[in-house]
Image (cartoon, helix red, strand yellow):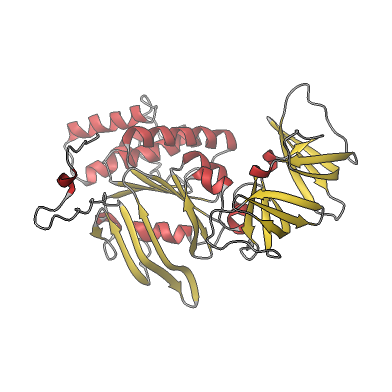
Amino acid sequence: MFCFLEDESDMNDPATGRAAAVEQPRPMVELRHVSKRFGGFTALADVDLQVARGEFLTLLGPSGSGKTTLLNMIAGMTPPTEGQVFIDGRDATSLPPAERDLGMVFQNYALMPHMTVFDNIAFPLKVRKVPRGEIAERVQRALDLIRLPDVGHRKPRELSGGQQQRVSLARCIVYNPALILLDEPLGALDKKLREQMQLEIKRIHSELGITMINVTHDQDEALTLSDRIVLMNRGRIEQHCAPEELYFRPRTVFAADFMGEANLLDAEVADATDTHVRLDWAHGALLAPRPTHTQERLQRGDRVVVLVRPECVSMGQGEAGDENRVAGRLRDSIVLGGVVKHYVTLPDGKELIVQQPNHVRRSAGFAGQDVHLAWQAHDALVLQAGSQPS
């Protein structure tokens, strides 16, 4: 809803005449200076984070990055060593999980095998002493939402893995929690089922508008599901932003290297203008846009790393507008269904990856073939050399 003000004075405090502060929506989850230590090991170090109402946020990172510890802290299963956890504006730092008004979906489904699907979904309602008639109605609505309306009488073992995970999600949804936490919920599924469940979870989130926080190490899952990704590294937040920004505009070499495949080129600044940077590297000159994510102006001689995604590199003679070119030798090509990945070795031994769409009339290269690679300046991203991957 939009509100149009007739007069600027409507925004002023009547007592002082000063502009009144616009009240910001209260976050569903807020972490303030949260740290967690296990003996001498620091799992989380001074983390601040806000999760908006209705947001689908993914905690992403390698093993040991702190993402699961952070989720368990929000759930109430791991107390912080320092800091506070707020849920819906209430200090929940010392509250047990049962008093946090949240649901949790696990990788192993956690369904009770001796109960029917109906009874599994109904269980949290029975614990809350919801009337029997209302239980039946709410369970059926949950089954309809997960698109399994006729399986209530069956046992979990009679369902596929994807169906069991949907039932696990329905068991959370049925009692209308304010927050749902997902701990690697798709990790036990095969690739096709995992992709189908990603779309189902995305649909359910869109229909219900419940705040969801997901933990995964799968970059594709994070890119598909998330409104925002929080990339973790060694107990700290490396970067948090929209999926597309994290993929195409990472702030550090770690983020660039972790998110998908990356061609990372060591280079030195030759010249920098207000719009572009000219660079020297082992195979000649490079041109890239001036980085906007740093306040420091690049100086001649600065060491940097240039990111070029494989799908941004062409193999052949290149296009007329391609400012960056290099020659190499094709080492191998791998067909992955709809795409083909080419591995090209440069004269100094460095390897670049090229990803191209696959099609029936594609001309296949052969190992040992001399090839030319090219990419446009706007497809390159300059990063500080010091932010190397772990």
Residue 203: where, in percent of width, then height?
41, 32
Q: Name the residue located 63 percent from the left edge and 54 percent from the top edge.
A: 273
In the displayed structure image, the side of residue 104 where residue 44 appears, left or right = right
The quarter in which the C terminus is drawn is bottom right
Residue at 26% over, 49% down:
25
Could you tell me if residue 222 is visible in this image? no
Q: Is residue 1 left or right of residue 343?
A: left
Pick the residue in front: 240 or 334. 240
Q: Is residue 227 above or below residue 280?
A: above
> How many numbered callouts?
0
Q: Quadrant of residue 326?
A: top right
The picture places residue 311, in percent across and down from the top left corner, at 68, 39
- Quarter holding the N terminus is top left
Q: Is residue 48 above or below residue 113?
A: below
In the foreground, 113 or 173: 173
**Residue 361: image x %, image y %?**
78, 21
The reply to whether residue 58 is in sight is: yes
In the picture as drawn, the residue positioned furthest to the bottom comes out as: 40
Residue 356 falls left or right of residue 367 = left
Residue 261 percent coordinates (x, y): 66, 47
Residue drawn at 44 percent across, 73 percent down: 37
